[in-house]
Amino acid sequence: MDFALIMFVLMLVTGAIWLLDILALSKKRSTGEVEPWWVEYAKSFFPVILLVFCIRSFLFEPFKIPSGSMIPTLQVGDFILVNKFTYGVRLPIINQKLVQLGDPQRGDVMVFHYPENPSVDYIKRVVGVPGDRVEYREKHLYINDVEQKQNAEGEYNYVESGLNFVHTERRSEVLGEHTHDVLINPDMPNAHLGSVADFKGRENCEYQEKRFTCRVPAGQYFMMGDNRDNSRDSRYWGFVPDNQIVGKAFFIWMNFSDLKRVGLSIN
């Protein structure tokens, strides 16, 4: 069950008990009589649950990075904060936008509900916004036929789960207002064509051995991981609709394996 839904149900139950006590139960208790334990607990927990629910729904929500698809920007084990109001105020649970405050921009690191399973949250970088023509050719990204410049930054090696040693090239890339690092394995294909799903809007994309192109539909976004050759992203499952957006990642607040990462901003 969705955590936000659990919090909402608990808030309703504890709030209802507190209100019932104010309107009826307290009037039936004699002077000096101790209130039932379940009323005491409800009155104690309701304000806390309400505060956490409002902060988590409208301001900031914590997430943990479970995979290496965003290395080197985000490491496995990073605990991050996501700004829930950058792109607008949304109703919790149903994720319906009430107030428009902004739109995702190219280069933003964004959390969203995974289109193939909305109960799962993913984090990737916004590469294409509505109307963009996204092309990935020879490990270089082109937006509307303009190459997004890359500069070599040397080698980057890491160990993934199963003690598998991974050797890559580290490159800095300019995307929108963001300059960030990406990892490239020149020996890997631009996309594993056999893993491409028959996603909604698939007709907007063209896949070839050494390149692919996608035209981003209105109200949707094209996402890619910074660890370009170890990321299952929009190349494989398609576009992210606006109503599946959770928020913009902006801060690392904890990593128990590497405390030096605590306090880093996410670019």
Image (cartoon, rainbow, N blue to C red):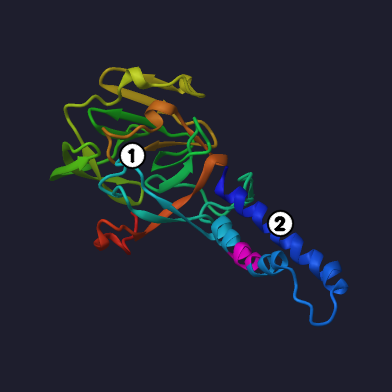
Q: Where, by quadrant of the figure, is residue 235 drawn?
A: top left
In the image, residue 123 lies in the stretch drawn in magenta: no
Q: Residue at x 79, y 82 (%)?
A: 32
Q: Is residue 73 above or below residue 229?
A: below
Q: Is residue 10 left or right of residue 251?
A: right
Q: Residue furthest bottom?
A: 32
Camera-nearest residue between 96 and 218: 96
**Quadrant that contains the C terminus:** bottom left
Q: Amino acid at mark 2?
A: Val
Q: Where, by quadrant of the figure, is residue 159 drawn?
A: top left
Q: Residue at x 15, y 44 (%)?
A: 156
Q: Is residue 121 left or right of residue 253?
A: right
Q: Residue furthest left?
A: 154
Q: Position of residue 64 (x, y in %)?
A: 39, 50
Q: Nearer the viewer, mark 2 or mark 1?
A: 2
Q: Position of residue 92 (x, y in %)?
A: 62, 50
Q: Amino acid at mark 1?
A: Gly
Q: Is residue 18 above or below residue 9?
A: below
Q: Main secondary structure of the magenta part?
A: helix
Residue of label 1: 225
Q: Is residue 170 above or below residue 115?
A: below
Q: Is residue 241 above or below residue 25?
A: above
| Contact check, label 2 and label 1, Cβ < 8 Å | no
Q: Residue at x 43, y 52 (%)?
A: 63
Residue of label 2: 13
SS of the residue at dot 1?
Answer: loop
In the rendered structure, which disc, 2 or 1, sits on the residue that comes first in sequence?
2
Camera-nearest residue between 134 and 91: 91
Where are the magenta residues, as a range?
45-51
